[in-house]
């Protein structure tokens, strides 16, 4: 395993192409559709977003209606309580968080207020907690604490990375507010990665996984000094001719990667990526490489696919 600071060229091109295509579709939306997509950014799943962007204009109103219907906690009542509460929180966030360079609902504090609701206690330290500190806010949801820090003294409070591990715990405790969406895959959490594969000759293929450290949620020990998690990697190679039918695996790989860092070590790694490599020995042919990645702490899961050709 190695730490790498840059993406592989092939992976970067694929990422850029996919992102540009969705961005072009979003720019082509009518104002009402664009406003809907912006307002539900904290709720919409990736599958829903892709589906919405590819819909003809005359089918989008029905999608929007169905989007909220699936989230209605009590369909028997004339009002959708969840929808009303969601937009009420956006309005409140804009009222509460007027400093900073963005509307309140788009700031970190606004995002957390919308997703988690008002904290049970909110402590503000305009001049920092310590003499040399920076403006800080501490929010409490029961026993869980979120800290927001204004690093540049501009009113732009950012969520402290070490508070992120608490978000999953708080949201799991508040599932009654955020309804489950039927027929949708569960949210992937914060985990991200880039996945690529290349032929190395001699019947070998190298699979490479790059995970930004900033997207890996870790759990602190009781002393708050060591942060840990385990990343589980599952890889399989399937001949392309059978990838859409009766999949016959030509190669499988599974391994757990424990991670453990001090707070100081994590501070230095947040801008870097964690690299995992696995080598497959395959017969000549074209293969689809399927990746399943999971973070043990928050249950975040993602799937990626790459192709590789093994020459004769």
Image (cartoon, rainbow, N blue to C red):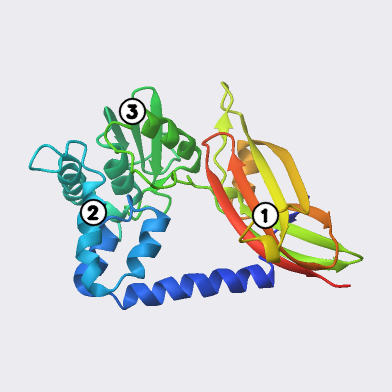
Q: Earlier in the sequence, mark 3 or mark 1?
A: 3
Structural distance between the alpha carbons of marks 3 and 1: 47 Å
**Residue bearing mark 3:** 141
Which numbered tag is attached to residue 66?
A: 2
| Front position among marks 3 and 1 | 1
Q: Residue at point 25% right, 57% down? A: 39
Towards the viewer: 244 or 230: 244
Q: Position of residue 217 (x, y in %)?
A: 54, 40
Q: For marks 3 and 2, give the CA distance.
A: 32 Å
Residue 155 versus residue 116 in the image, above or below: below
| Label 1 SS | loop
Q: Earlier in the sequence, mark 3 or mark 2?
A: 2
Residue 5 in view in this figure: no
- What distance separates the C-alpha of mark 2 from that of mark 1? 34 Å
Residue 18 at x, y = what percent? 51, 71
* Label 3 vs label 2, nearer the camera: 2
Q: Position of residue 137 (x, y in %)?
A: 34, 38
Neighbour class for label 1 at 10 Å: few (<14), some, many (≥20)?
few
- Closer to us: 16 or 47: 47
In this view of the protein, which residue sits in the foreground, 265 or 228?
228
Nearest the viewer among 9 and 290 is: 290
Residue pictured at 30% horizontal, 61% vertical: 101
- Few, some or many residues within 10 Å of mark 2 (<14, 14–19, 20+): few
Q: Residue at label 1?
A: 247
Cβ–Cβ below 8 Å for labels 3 and 1?
A: no
Q: Is residue 249 left or right of residue 105?
A: right
Marks 2 and 1 in Cβ contact (< 8 Å): no
- The secondary element bearing badge 2 is classed as helix
Instruction: Give the quadrant of residue 240.
Output: bottom right
Helix, strand or loop status at disc 3: strand
Q: Residue at x 27, y 44 (%)?
A: 114
């Amino acid at each position: 395993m190695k730490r790498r600071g840059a993406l592989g060229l092939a992976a970067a091109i694929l990422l850029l192409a996919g992102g540009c295509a969705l961005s072009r579709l979003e720019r082509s939306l009518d104002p009402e559709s664009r406003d809907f997509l912006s307002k539900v950014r904290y709720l919409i799943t990736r599958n829903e977003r892709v589906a919405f962007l590819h819909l003809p204009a005359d089918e989008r109103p029905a999608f929007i209606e169905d989007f909220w219907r699936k989230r209605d906690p009590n369909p028997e009542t004339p009002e959708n309580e969840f929808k009303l509460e969601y937009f009420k929180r956006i309005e409140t966030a804009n009222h509460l968080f007027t400093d900073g360079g963005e509307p309140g609902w788009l700031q970190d504090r606004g995002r957390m207020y919308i997703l988690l609701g008002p904290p049970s206690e909110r402590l503000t330290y305009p001049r920092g907690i310590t003499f040399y500190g920076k403006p800080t806010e501490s929010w409490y949801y029961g026993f869980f604490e979120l800290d927001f820090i204004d690093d540049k003294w501009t009113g732009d409070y950012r969520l402290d990375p070490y508070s992120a591990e608490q978000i999953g715990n708080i949201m799991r405790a508040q599932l009654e507010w955020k309804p489950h969406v039927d027929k949708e895959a569960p949210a992937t959490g914060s985990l991200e990665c880039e996945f690529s594969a290349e032929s190395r000759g001699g019947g070998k293929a190298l699979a490479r996984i790059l995970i930004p450290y900033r997207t890996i949620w870790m759990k602190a020990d009781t002393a708050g000094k060591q942060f840990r998690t385990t990343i589980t990697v599952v890889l399989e190679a399937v001949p392309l001719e059978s990838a859409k039918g009766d999949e016959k695996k030509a190669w499988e790989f599974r391994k757990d990667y424990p991670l453990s860092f001090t707070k100081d070590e994590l501070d230095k790694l947040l801008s870097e990526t964690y690299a995992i490599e696995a080598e497959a020995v395959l017969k000549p042919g074209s293969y689809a490489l399927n990746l399943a990645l999971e973070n043990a702490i928050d249950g975040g899961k993602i799937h990626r696919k790459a192709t590789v050709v093994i020459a004769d």
